[in-house]
Image: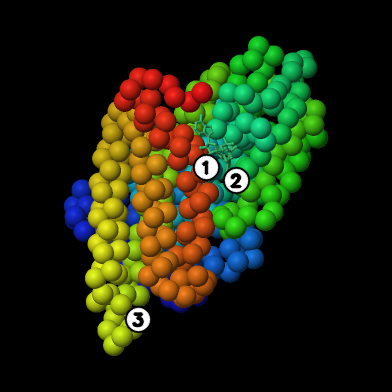
């Protein structure tokens, strides 16, 4: 792959809205991506392999649980810093950002928010450092957009519960040491459990054949009469609000991340438009190509401002899940459109691994689907503004 020449677009001087600390954090992650991710990621994606070495690296960089308090190994940072980290990671590859999102927002967040003190002490420092990798099991083969229908269940067995069922499409599953799993108890309440690799009856078969997020490992979680100690149940939450609150945190990271992928596609297309000549001129001299670039930078700028404002509201504790849905949906739409336009601007070169655009474009097809599909986020906004539920 060619050298990573990324230059971040900032058309409306949004940098002025960031603190020096936030800019430093962004720069640190950007440098890491240029040095450690860009040189290897295309090769891993082509081979559909997970670059395991990034797990301790991301831990050391502070990308796992950046908003978790430092006493548990987290970064104790604000939400804009967290967003900028996700933006930079996904600028490199959506799979790398997915690994960090799952670990921080879907595994560490519920343990910190709903776990016992013993659970926090036992799991959070190891997850923060990247010594352990975690995964989050909500989606089932027959229940994706409607997790309330889940059939994975636990039954009382003295000091343990017995867990049965299966989860599908689980990021990090094949490499994870721990899984935060959502299952219904005998009263029909959704409970969160920490399931550890090695528990008898627990397996994590890999999902093969993906054309998207190829450098992120995806798998199933299969539970065949797994005895899980009751001390592994998250005591602080019952019901779907548990997993949904985790998804709000992760979707917030995706809003920033997907825009990072868009920024990379735009930057690549802009540079290419000045270098590639046809009909005796750089292709950037043609109005049709300028139109594409002008629309890309306009959408990126709008997205940057939306994300920044959402970050402020998150820091103030005033952001609603519905606002997070809007930002996730917006960034995914902007990014998928920009990736498609940018790919066309590179002509035939755009379909090769020589450039990052096609990989982003395929990755974004997962990003627009997971953590609530594009349709579902639109319905969430629709319900919020009308007060009418159009889900079912
Ligand atoms: P379905 O729910 O079957 O939806 C199919 C289509 O129907 C979609 O277009 C949807 O928008 C539409 N639809 C559904 N309901 C409605 C409705 N009421 N009104 C209108 N349209 C509707 N899950 C996890 O738990 N953990 C993970 O780590 C994880 N990682 C993932 C990684 C990848 C690469 C992928 C692809 C998925 C991952 N997922 C994970 C699962 C993901 O969250 C689900 O794929 C997603 O929620 C959609 O569920 P589904 O695939 O079953 O689609």
Q: Secondary structure at mark 1?
A: loop
Label 1: how many Cα within 10 Å (few below 14, some 14–19, many 20+): some
Q: Are marks 1 and 2 in contact (CB under 8 Å)?
A: yes
Q: Position of residue 306 (x, y in %)?
A: 28, 43
Q: Is mark 1 within 8 Å of ligand 1?
A: yes
Q: Quadrant of ligand 1?
A: top right
Q: Is mark 3 within 8 Å of ligand 1?
A: no
Which residue is drawn at the image coordinates 38% and 65% (left, top)?
342
Query: Residue at label 2?
Result: 171
Q: Position of residue 243 (x, y in %)?
A: 53, 29
155, above or below 49, in the image: above
Residue reaching furthest to the top: 187
Q: Is residue 97 left or right of residue 157?
A: left
Q: Is residue 306 visible?
A: yes
Q: Quadrant of residue 78?
A: top left
**Front: mark 1 or 2:** 1
Which residue is drawn at the image coordinates 66% and 32% (left, top)?
142
Q: Earlier in the sequence, mark 1 or mark 2?
A: 2
Q: Quadrant of residue 126?
A: top right
Q: Is mark 2 within 8 Å of ligand 1?
A: yes
Query: Residue at label 3?
Result: 276
Q: Position of residue 119 (x, y in %)?
A: 59, 29
Which residue is drawn at the image coordinates 69% and 26% (left, top)?
152
**Front: mark 3 or 2:** 3
Which mark identifies residue 370?
1
**Front: mark 1 or 3:** 3
Using the image as rendered, state which of residue 300 and residue 351 is in the foreground.
351
355, above or below 391, in the image: below
Which residue is drawn at the image coordinates 64% and 26% (left, top)?
150
Q: Secondary structure at mark 3?
A: loop
Q: Are marks 1 and 3 in contact (CB under 8 Å)?
A: no
């Amino acid at each position: 792959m060619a050298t990573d020449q990324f230059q971040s677009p900032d058309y409306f001087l949004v940098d002025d809205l960031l603190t020096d600390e936030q800019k430093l954090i962004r720069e640190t992650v950007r440098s890491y991506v240029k040095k450690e991710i860009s040189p290897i990621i295309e090769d891993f994606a082509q081979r559909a392999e997970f670059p395991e070495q990034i797990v301790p690296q991301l831990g050391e960089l502070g990308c796992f649980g950046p908003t978790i308090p430092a006493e548990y190994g987290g970064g104790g940072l604000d939400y804009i810093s967290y967003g900028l980290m996700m933006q930079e990671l996904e600028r490199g590859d959506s799979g790398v950002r997915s690994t960090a999102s799952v670990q921080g927002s879907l595994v560490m967040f519920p343990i910190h928010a709903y776990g016992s003190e013993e659970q926090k002490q036992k799991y959070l420092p190891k997850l923060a450092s990247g010594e352990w990798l975690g995964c989050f099991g909500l989606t089932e083969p027959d229940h994706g957009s409607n997790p309330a229908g889940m059939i994975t269940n636990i039954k009382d067995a003295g000091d343990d519960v017995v867990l049965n069922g299966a989860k599908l499409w689980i990021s990090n599953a094949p490499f994870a040491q721990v899984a935060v799993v959502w299952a219904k108890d005998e009263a029909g309440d959704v409970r969160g459990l920490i399931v550890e690799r090695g528990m008898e009856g627990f397996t994590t078969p890999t999902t093969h054949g993906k054309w998207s997020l190829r450098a992120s490992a995806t798998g199933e979680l299969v539970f065949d009469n797994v005895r899980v100690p009751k001390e592994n149940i998250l005591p602080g939450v019952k019901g779907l609000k548990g997993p949904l609150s985790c998804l709000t945190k992760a979707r917030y990271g995706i809003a920033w991340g997907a825009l990072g992928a868009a920024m990379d596609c735009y930057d690549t297309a802009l540079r290419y438009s000045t270098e590639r000549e046809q009909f005796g001129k750089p292709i950037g001299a043609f109005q049709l190509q300028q139109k594409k670039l002008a629309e890309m930078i306009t959408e990126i700028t709008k997205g940057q401002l939306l994300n920044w404002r959402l970050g402020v509201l998150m820091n103030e504790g005033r952001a609603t899940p519905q606002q997070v849905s809007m930002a996730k949906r917006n960034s995914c739409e902007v990014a998928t459109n920009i990736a498609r336009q940018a790919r066309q601007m590179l002509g035939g070169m755009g379909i090769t691994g020589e450039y990052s655009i096609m990989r982003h474009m395929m990755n974004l097809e997962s990003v627009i689907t997971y953590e609530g599909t594009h349709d579902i986020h639109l319905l969430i906004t629709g319900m919020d503004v009308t007060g009418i539920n159009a889900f079912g």
